[in-house]
Amino acid sequence: MRIAPDGTWMATIGRYDRIYNHRDPIIEVWDPATGERIDRVDTCIASGLRQLLIGPDSIWLTVVGDDAVAVWCRERSTQAAMRIGSTIRDCAVAPRRRVIFVVSAAGLHGFDVQA
């Protein structure tokens, strides 16, 4: 679970099923004041989600699967996904910019987020 920097919403990623070794590709967005779910997004990342990051402006979030990254813009309810082509090792969001850095077996990748 991650809380947006402005504190107005938080997000969780899907469940992990230990029996079938399957991760869910779903993002759920919650209102922390009421505890109500305010959105549910299917990222369509077949490998499921391993990591969740929220942008510093609280407008967008990034989720990471085994070999793909998806960005979801909360204001526009739009989504974009990028397949990296090799196993993702880690992901980070630049603290003051709309940039995502992904480290994979193939090297370092940087993506500019146009929210």
Image: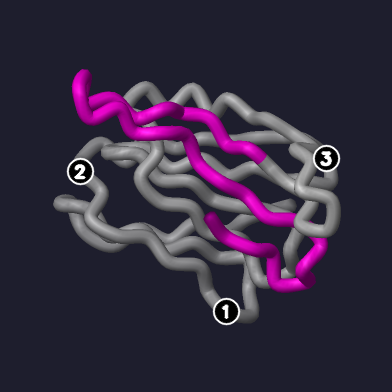
Q: What percent of the width, then of the height, locates residue 115?
A: 74, 52
Query: Position of 93 compared to 23: left or right?
Result: right
Q: Residues within 10 Å of mark 3 (few under 14, many from 20)?
A: few
Q: Which residue is mark 3?
A: 76
Q: Position of residue 12 (x, y in %)?
A: 56, 46
Q: Residue at x 51, y 35 (%)?
A: 81
Q: Amino acid at mark 3?
A: Arg
Residue at 77% x, 68% y is 7
Q: Quadrant of residue 92?
A: bottom left
**Left or right of residue 103, residue 79 in this image:** right
Looking at this rendering, what residue extends furthest in the front direction? 34
Q: Which residues are magenta?
A: 1-28
Give how far across and how far down residue 25 sits, in percent. 46, 28
Q: Quadrant of residue 84?
A: top left
Q: CA distance from mark 1 to mark 2?
A: 24 Å
Closest to the observer, 115 or 30: 30
Q: Secondary structure at mark 2?
A: loop
Q: Is residue 90 above or below residue 57?
A: above
| Residue located 75% across and 34% down the image | 39
Q: Secondary structure at mark 1?
A: loop
| Residue 87 marker | 2
Spatial CA distance of label 1 from label 3 is 22 Å
**Pointer 2 local density, CA inside 10 Å: few below 14, some 14–19, many at least 20:** some
On residue 80, the disc is: none
Q: Which mark is residue 95?
A: 1
Circles 3 and 2, Cβ within 8 Å, touching? The answer is no
